[in-house]
Amino acid sequence: MKLSEWAARNGVHYQTAWAWAKEGRMSVPVVQTPSGLWLVEESAPEVVGWTVAYCRVSSGDQKADFDRQVSRVVQVAIGLGLAIAEVVTEAGSGLNGNRRKLHRVLSDPAVAVLVVEHRDRLARFGVEHLESARSASGRRLVVLDPQETTSGLVRDITEVLTSMCARL
């Protein structure tokens, strides 16, 4: 990763990190490319625990979509080298904060990697907070299809409208 990214992640001003790299005082291995770019050789922390796939549909009418969603998630996860220990399926709104199965998966410290197809399958809002919380505890969230609108506001409005239309 670039030195500037490492500095931002670790709350260090870029110029300080650059000075540390030049002086050989970095806490992680760094290498300078021939073009002068500093790269941090940060190995990914080894994740110990289960990998769980979480698949959700919005209503019971869509339960037929579970099989297709589960199949896609498991196939792509295996392609990424992730061995799925459990597949958790749930029918309920992404705005519902009381999904029992999701709460069980999120609160289980043995679940090291949580795999979802799209961000909105996990929650309509606040996925960034879940990612941060999992990362801080040494666990990961893997979103297999991270494509989304580039504007956060557009995404939020789309999610609210989708939710409201689903209630009609």
Image (cartoon, grey):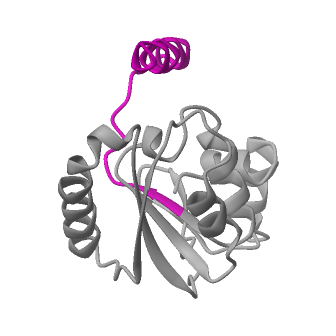
Residue 33 in picture, x, y percent from top left: 44, 59
Residue 73 in picture, x, y percent from top left: 27, 61
**Residue occupying the point 67% across, 75% down:** 108
Residue 148 in picture, x, y percent from top left: 37, 29
Residue 109 sits above or below residue 99 on the image: below
Let me know if residue 67 appears in the view: yes
- The residues colored magenta run 141-168
Count the numbered circles shown: 0
**Residue occupying the point 41% across, 37% down:** 58
Residue 110 sits above or below residue 1 on the image: below
Q: Nearer the viewer, residue 115 or 9?
A: 115
* Left or right: 149 as drawn, with respect to 136: left
Residue 111 sits above or below residue 123 on the image: below
Image quarter for residue 134? bottom right
Tell me the quarter of the image containing the C terminus.
Answer: top left
**Residue occupying the point 66% across, 50% down:** 130
Furthest residue toward bottom: 48
Residue 68 in picture, x, y percent from top left: 17, 54
* Left or right: 101 as drawn, with respect to 144: right
Q: Nearer the viewer, residue 54 or 132?
A: 54
